[in-house]
Image (cartoon, rainbow, N blue to C red):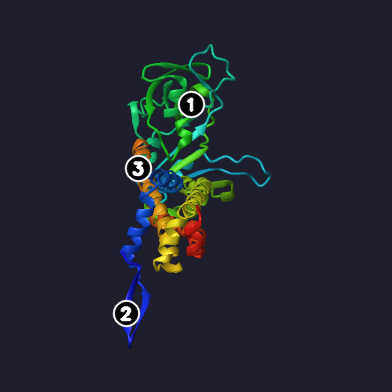
Amino acid sequence: MSETTSRVRGSGRRLIPARLGPRDVFRVGLSGLRARPTRVVLSALGIAIGIATMVAVIGISSSSKEQLLRQIDELGTNMLTAGPGRTFLGEDAKLPENAVEMVKRIGPVGNAGATGTIDATIRRTNLIPKEVTGGLAVQAASTDLLKTLDGTLRTGTWLNAGTERYPGVVLGSEAAKRLGITHVGEQAWLGNRWFTVIGILNSLPLAPEIDRSALVGWEAARRYLGFDGHPTTIYERSTNASVEAVAAVLPRTINPENPNEVDVSRPSDALEARAAAAGAFTNLLLGLGAVALLVGGVGVANTMVISVLERRREIGLRRSLGATRGQVRTQFLAESLLLSALGGVVGVLLGAVTTVAFATYRDWPPVIPAWALAGAVVATLAIGTIAGLYPAMRAARLSPTVALTTA
């Protein structure tokens, strides 16, 4: 391709440099990369690793957050819990024995259940020392608890009017796992006697304390384990529109004389907090990805500087044929941008594949925000521009005569 064109102005002829269109710039830049494929691949790899890390981190974090939000929507945000607070003297308060019945009288409340902490331990056999609790709690449970929690049984049956009076126990999912119990009918040493396992629960994300508990009937807890009948946690579900209103009246309803001794919370807030807290760790991993991207940019800059040194004769020949400094600068800047773009495309693909694979493995919905892809493109172009700016300016400053005579 000729570097110059001629135009006739008046009676004289004047050489005017030909302009490089976008297509010409692309072809010239691509030809420079094709001449050194191995070096190009290795340089683009650094950019690809940085971009892939950033896209994968954002994608996996977004997928995890989406899973949590979907879980919250599925479980509902209309459940509240109430527990004993502290008295005016700083002592542990107690909820009234009839607290559950009082809560059920609140108009918008649909279901209410309770648990009560028992001073007892559960062990696989009576040969295990009493101090070895495995982190498991023993609690009395009302018959309405499972319905209130919207929980399900993995196997067996829940406590009912017929079983709550006898030494039967329902295990939370984690409790059953730690005890090594998988079937109903097996026995566990609870307090100072054997209890028969009548049911095993599935996991309850909104009530993880139940997962680590052994639940016995209210009457059986009184008869066999010395339970005092005071609930320690009350669970209630109401309509979504009335959650705030119910939360406001719960303390006065449960304990009219001392409403300040009742603590009310919403379990779904914990899941929302987990979704929000995921960003802290994500920022750390993004920082590592940015470092990898910076290292890749340094590699691109180094590749372009070496390319300028090796191609001084080519630069001198082009300048002697009429190429301007701007055209030489554009050529090397285009090569740097194409090199970075190659790494960016590969990085985006790797990051997307990693996100989808990990999300599928964890049974999460794969989510890659559009802003993450747009950010990857912008970061790639920025790295390519910055990395190629100095080599391009250095190539443009080369004198044609000096470049042609340099060995």
In the image, is residue 98 above or below residue 107?
above
Distance, label 2 to label 1, CA atoms, is 104 Å
Q: Classify mark 1: helix, strand or loop.
A: helix
**Which residue sits at x=37%, y=25%?**
199
Q: Amino acid at mark 1?
A: Ala
In the image, is residue 312 above or below residue 175?
below
- Report if residue 98 is visible in the image: no
The reply to whether callout 1 and callout 3 are in contact (CB within 8 Å) is: no
Earlier in the chain: of badge 1 and badge 3, it is 1
**Residue on which the image places disc 2:** 7
Drawn side of residue 121 relative to residue 56, left or right? right
Image location (x, y in percent) of residue 39: 43, 45
In the image, is residue 389 above or below residue 42?
below
**Residue on which the image places disc 1:** 221
Image location (x, y in percent) of residue 313: 45, 56
Q: Amino acid at mark 2?
A: Arg
**Which residue sits at x=52%, y=23%?**
225
Distance, label 1 to label 3, CA atoms, is 53 Å
Earlier in the chain: of badge 3 and badge 2, it is 2
Earlier in the chain: of badge 2 and badge 1, it is 2
Disc number placed over residue 353 in the picture, else none = 3
Rendered image quadrant of residue 165: top left
Rendered image quadrant of residue 211: top left
Distance, label 3 to label 2, CA atoms, is 54 Å
- Report if residue 187 is visible in the image: yes
